[in-house]
Amino acid sequence: MEKMTGIRRIPPLVFNCPFCRAVWHSTNFGACFLIALFESLFMKRFYVDSNIWLDFALDRKDNIRPLGELAFQFFRKAVREKWQILYSDIVLRELGKELTKEEIWQRCFKMVSDENLLGKAMVSVEQEKEAEKISKQQKVPFADAAHAIIARDNNAVVVSRDAHFGNLFKVVKSFLPEEL
């Protein structure tokens, strides 16, 4: 006769993970949840606008500040602190107006990609539709609205000098590179 231990076996529950939509059993739920929680608490993620990449690549200056140096300091801190840096096809298009593809990779992305900190955020049709809507509502360029939505959907903060992000504060947080 089997001895009763007082422990009742409960069948595992099956549900979708809220982060990755994978099917999880209660016995293994938490892996992606814990990863997302860890990333949100300990890993900083930044979506860098093209104006910061150009400041860095072209060592730009304005009348007062060395913008290229400020961008360099941000990227150096990102490497030191192991922050994840995101870009998208929209950033590539904007950079492509002033740099060749090779220059984009060598002068912009190399510093963070060599440290495996560079990630490409994909743009969905839904994000483009939402960006169009927000662009019209907030009277900001489509690309800036798209940057904000992409950053939000990737749990990232925008790094930019663009004043339009002040109108997008309900969508995403944004900072100057020297504020980080």
Image: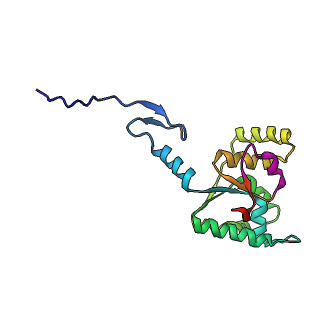
Q: Is residue 3 above or below residue 78?
A: above
- From where the camera sits, is residue 143 visible? no
174 vs 117, nearest the viewer? 174
Q: Is residue 98 above or below residue 140?
A: below
> Going by the image, does 155 lie left or right of 169?
left
Residue at (69% x, 49% y) in the render:
151
- From where the camera sits, is residue 135 visible? yes
99 vs 164, nearest the viewer? 164
34 vs 109, nearest the viewer? 34
Magenta segment, which residues? 162-173
Residue at (75% x, 73% y) in the render:
69
Q: Residue furthest left?
A: 1
> Going by the image, does 13 lie left or right of 173?
left
Does the magenta-highlighted stretch encompass residue 163? yes
> Going by the image, does 11 lie left or right of 173?
left
Residue at (79% x, 61% y) in the render:
51
Does the magenta-highlighted stretch encompass residue 119? no
Residue at (65% x, 70% y) in the render:
76
- Quarter of the rendering containing residue 54: bottom right
62 vs 146, nearest the viewer? 62
